[in-house]
Amino acid sequence: MENIPTLAITLAVIFFLFEVFKKLKPTDISTFQTDKTVEQLRKKYRKYDLLSLAFFWLFIIILTFVYYFLFVWISDFRISILKEIVIVVKPFIAAWILTAFFTAMLTATLITIYLGKWKLKADWDEYSAYGYMKSGYSPKVGSIVMRTFAIITAILIIGFLDWFTAFRQDDIIVNGLFGLGNKTYQYADITDIRDIDKLEAPNGNIVEDKHYIIVFNDGSKWNSRNNGFGDYKSDTGIIDLIENKTGRQLTKLEFDLD
């Protein structure tokens, strides 16, 4: 259920992009001329509409599972190359599910279009005209939106595949989301370990949100809210390891210092 808001926002963005490109790329109506009315075309293509929609969602469901396991395998394989890992933090399952869903949706769209052209043959142009008459979105607009969405999805895939924190026997490898390469710290580089109780939300409200912050000697920080397990109790295991490796004690604070 926690993925529903993100999915709703994504669908809203797609709709917004359709509207934007509809204005920026007005359709040449002559390309979609047909002597038949929408009702006539709806009756003619009703069976195909239902069939293509059913296959579209079937492809999405199957491909979501395929992409999910593929992305997770690639991520795990990449991390498995590292040696002497004690604790590793990887992207949340929800992140991979959503990314797999977006990728599956793009792939299913391409497959459905290809099968439609193969199935309808000479009727494909008429069906395209029917689609424009129903929605007002030409195939050109749809193509631009899907390409834009594909670029965004590709950025997410690359970002998640390269996002992890590995706490090893002698050092810590930090690779933040959309970060450029790994950064390795020795445990001796840690200058403070903070146990934070609260934070200021974007709307200015003060909220209870217990989390940890590890401060390194170059001023950078590792925040368990962004790069941890997303659970205070689970993140405590990381802090226990840090305390044992560094001999430092927790600095308990109501808010972060800076």
Image (cartoon, rainbow, N blue to C red):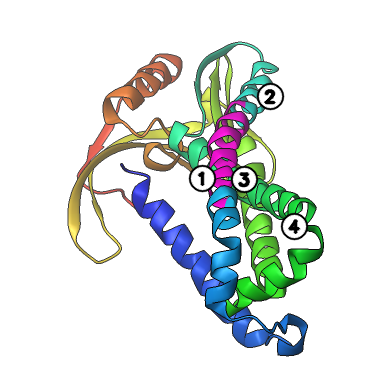
Residue 61, given in percent of the width and then of the height, sits at: 53, 37
Tell me the mark number nearer the camera, choosing from 3 and 1.
Answer: 3
Residue at screen point 31% across, 50% down: 257
Q: Name the residue beneath numbered marker 1.
A: 220
Query: Considering the image in quadrants, where does the C terminus appear?
Result: bottom left
Which of the marked residues, 3 or 1, is nearer the chain's N terminus?
3
Q: Eyeballing the image, is 99 above or below 240?
A: below
- Disc 1 crowd rating (10 Å Cα; few below 14, some 14-19, many 20+) is few
Q: Name the residue beneath numbered marker 3.
A: 103
Labels 4 & 2 near each other (Cβ < 8 A): no
- Disc 4 crowd rating (10 Å Cα; few below 14, some 14-19, many 20+) is some
- Disc 3 crowd rating (10 Å Cα; few below 14, some 14-19, many 20+) is many
Tell me the mark number nearer the camera, choosing from 4 and 1.
Answer: 4
Q: Is residue 179 visible?
A: no
Residue 25, given in percent of the width and then of the height, sits at: 69, 84
Labels 2 & 1 near each other (Cβ < 8 A): no
Which of the marked residues, 4 or 2, is nearer the chain's N terminus?
2
Q: Hey, which quadrant is residue 46 in on the image?
A: bottom right
Amino acid at circle 3: Thr
Amino acid at circle 2: Arg
Tell me the mark number nearer the camera, choosing from 2 and 1.
Answer: 2
Which of the marked residues, 3 or 2, is nearer the chain's N terminus?
2
Q: Name the residue beneath numbered marker 2.
A: 78
Q: Is residue 60 magenta?
A: yes
Q: Nearer the viewer, residue 225 or 20?
A: 20
Tell me the mark number nearer the camera, choosing from 4 and 2.
Answer: 4
Q: Is residue 1 visible?
A: yes
The magenta stretch spans which residues? 53-69
Residue 244, given in percent of the width and then of the height, sits at: 40, 14
Q: What number is the disc on residue 120?
A: 4
Amino acid at circle 4: Leu
Residue 217, given in percent of the width and then of the height, sits at: 52, 39
